[in-house]
Image (cartoon, helix red, strand yellow):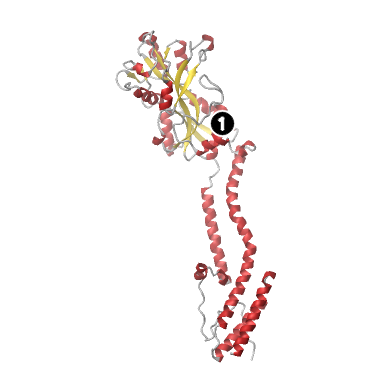
Amino acid sequence: MSEPSVPSQPAPPLALNGSVRKPLSFLQKVFRGEFLLLTRGEQTRLALMLLALLALLLWFLFRFIEPPPPKVVRISTGSASGAYTLYAKQYEQALKKHGVTLEIVNSAGSVENLQRLDDPKQKIDLAFVQGGVSTAAQHPRVEALASVAYEPIWCFYNKKRFDSAKPPTRLSDMAGRLLAIDAVGSGVHAAASQLLEMNKVPTQGALISPLGGMQAVDAVLAGTLDAAILVAAVDSPAVQKALSEELGLMNFENADAYVRLLPWVAKVTLPKGVAKLDKNLPREDITLIAATANLVGTTDLHRAIMFLMLDVASTVHKKPAATNAQTEFPSERNLDYAQSEESKRFFKSGKPFLEDYLPFWLANLVERMLLTLVPVIAIGLPLLRMIPAFFSWRGYAQLVQLYDDVIALEQQTGANAAAKSQGLIRLREINDHVSRLRLGAEHHMNVYNLKSHIDLVQARLNAS
């Protein structure tokens, strides 16, 4: 009688009554944690499932890692000759050194700038906005990066229309006067209206004129208006003309009250002679209130561009002016809109560490690589460490599967002769299979234990 052939893989375990013992399914083994009983094919299937899960995890990771910063950004300013456009031109020159092109888009002013930021179709990334024009609740898509300058609020008046012994010192003194507050829709009109309403001064009617800037100053000089409210820098042509012609300039005696009540208002002092030193204008120190010009952006503006804009702003706006000291701007004070997280980090810690030593684009590339590689390393390193453990586990799993067959064969003592014969054949197959296994030295003891138990079960079957 010839020896039975030895299969390359262990046959399914046979019960000694001749029936095939029903094995656990792949899912049953996985859910019950019987990983050592997985066949080679099932181990491959589980490995593929884990790889697919890892690939899905990495896809989500890369999905939320930000793309590279854009090379072109657009900023909405104001009139072509206004202060905001002058600021933007300085930004433009500074950004060129970092490989970023700044496109300057002129506008009618702060109100239109906010409208453009609210509308994604306008494709405006940044803007300068005068304080007091609107609120954060009305513009949830707008985030503040920094306040960059004071814009004094001037109330010039015709001295002939007021009692020289008691000049106006509060906006409530403008009640019943012919007053210019610029056109509806302008930032000046929005700020002036808010201030006047707080003082119970009507902002509509025949006494209110829509003139602004130089036209308003000329009307006050001509006597067709009693006063005009302007929001402009000290060196603006309209303010310079008003000071040169020595129009009356209201000294805000209750400036501290405005600062307490309005977050966008700051108290500033115009020192004697600071506007025109040769003519000693103004003739005395003047207390004014000022709106703050805010540099704002959309909520989806790239964080690297935010940091770069703030870094450039630190150079453009650090110079002293008539109403602010050196390095007072940019600042995180007097912001009308929600401050971006990048702005908070910038004022707390400065620009990203790498940008102190590398060009902007290279620093950003390294930062993005780190953002990508750190999670990959965090996931991949444990997997690499698991490879030797996996092979050790796989060898141990093969022995456990064979042990499982031996235990199944041992669980009968009173079987008939045919079943015993099948059991003994199966034990010889298992023994031959064990001899062909190529396992590491750590499994030698387990191999010889298994062979000993095979001999023991063979002896029991022969004895019974």
Residue 349: give x, y in percent of width and height: 57, 36
Q: Is residue 225 above or below residue 80?
A: above
Q: Position of residue 332 (x, y in %)?
A: 50, 31
Circle 1 is placed at which residue position?
312
Quarter placement of the N terminus: bottom right
- Can residue 20 be seen here? The reply is yes
Quadrant housing the C terminus: bottom right
- Residue in the image at 52% along x and 22% along y: 324
- The residue at the point 52 percent across, 56 percent down is 56
**Above or below 351: residue 209:** above
Specify whether 447 is left or right of 350: right
Label 1 neighbourhood size at 10 Å, few (<14), some (14-19), many (20+)?
some
Check disc 1 and give the amino acid type. Val
Q: Regarding mark 1 in the picture, which secondary structure is present there? A: helix
Residue 409: percent from left, percent from top: 57, 82
Q: Quadrant of residue 113?
A: top left
